[in-house]
Image: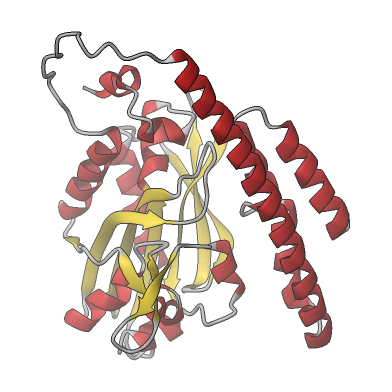
Amino acid sequence: MDLELIVCEAKHAFSAASDIAALENEKARFLGKTGKLTKFLKGIGQLDPDMRKKEGAAINVAKHQIDMALQERRQVLSDALLDARLATEIIDVTLPGRGMGNGTLHPVLKTWERVEYIFRSIGFDVADGPEIESEWFNFTALNSPENHPARSMQDTFYIEGNDDTGKPLLLRTHTSPMQVRYAYMKKPPIKLIAPGRTYRVDFDATHSPMFHQIEGLWIADDVSFSDLKGIYTDFLRKFFENDDIQVRFRPSYFPFTEPSAEIDMYFQTGKNAGKWLEISGAGQVHPTVLRNMGLDPECHVGFAFGSGLERLTMLRYGVEDLRLFYENDLRFLRQFM
């Protein structure tokens, strides 16, 4: 399928979307991590330099055309929704005020607290860092230099201005920068988790522009992949309160770990019964990342893992659409009181 055909198909799909949610799902089909246009982008690295430059320019043109069509359709749907609300919603300002109800923690924050409790119980520190992050900490220090393909997979929100060293600022795409920041403050052994808010340009049933992630890191002179497997398997069994959980590690690729693995969990009951579902990414800390921490990879070794708190919450409570967490619908949130 060539680029012109993908652009035409995207425009047709956007025009056929009847509401914002359907439009965002169509966007993911073309521009998401496994989208049709993204597959072209991932293949650029296999071309020679001249063809890479030519194909890259063509893909950028196609992406711009798809973005323009997306924005135009989004504006049309937003205007139609606003017109409908203005025509039907009437506020009676003479009605008496409503009393205050009892509140409770948001389900994602409940997961956050539960995860912290489990890892604190086995000796992990909890670290916190800035959400407005330097490009160097967010990408370069984690072995994703400028023009690295991994950057396009984590498209994010850049901010005007630079940090003290002249590096661009952005809303962090993961909590992984805390690996390097924490290593600057404390020498090995390092054993930490870093939960927090993160940001990427994604919005569909399983992705949100703002979401929560927990990063885990253990660096010492004698840790191994077996430690990673034991700790994370034990965490899942405690989190889901099920000692029969099966876990597998699949070879994968992340720029900041080598070797790398996707962690899957097998469900024996519920709507996911009989399925393996991805629940985390992990791996041994890449030597380049260790050097950027100021550590000698010949003397220190470690592993890292990253999990989405929304994904853990969805699997624990059987929620199928991540967007429900952020719509503030009390009928949904009361289930977790």
Which is more toward the observer, 45 or 63? 63
Which is more toward the observer, 105 or 214? 105
Q: Is residue 180 above or below residue 115?
A: below
Residue occupying image coordinates x 32% and y 82%:
163
Residue 66: x and y, percent?
71, 53
Residue 210: x and y, percent?
39, 49
- Image quadrant for the N terminus? bottom right
Q: Is residue 54 left or right of residue 163?
A: right
Res. 270 visible in picture: no
Residue occupying image coordinates x 55% and y 39%:
276
Tell me the quarter of the picture where residue 151 sits: bottom right
Q: Is residue 116 left or right of residue 10?
A: left
Which of the colour schemes (rainbow, by chain, secondary structure, one colour) is used?
secondary structure
Q: Is residue 332 left or right of residue 187?
A: right
Q: Is residue 141 above or below residue 158?
A: below
Residue 76: x and y, percent?
62, 36
Residue occupying image coordinates x 19% and y 33%:
105
Tell me the quarter of the picture where residue 39 sits: bottom right
Q: How many marks?
A: 0
- Image quadrant for the C terminus? top left
Which is more toward the observer, 289 or 157? 157
Q: Is residue 319 above or below residue 189?
A: above
Residue 331: x and y, percent?
33, 17
Tell me the quarter of the picture where residue 14 sits: top right
Res. 307 visible in picture: yes
Q: Is residue 209 above or below residue 305?
A: above
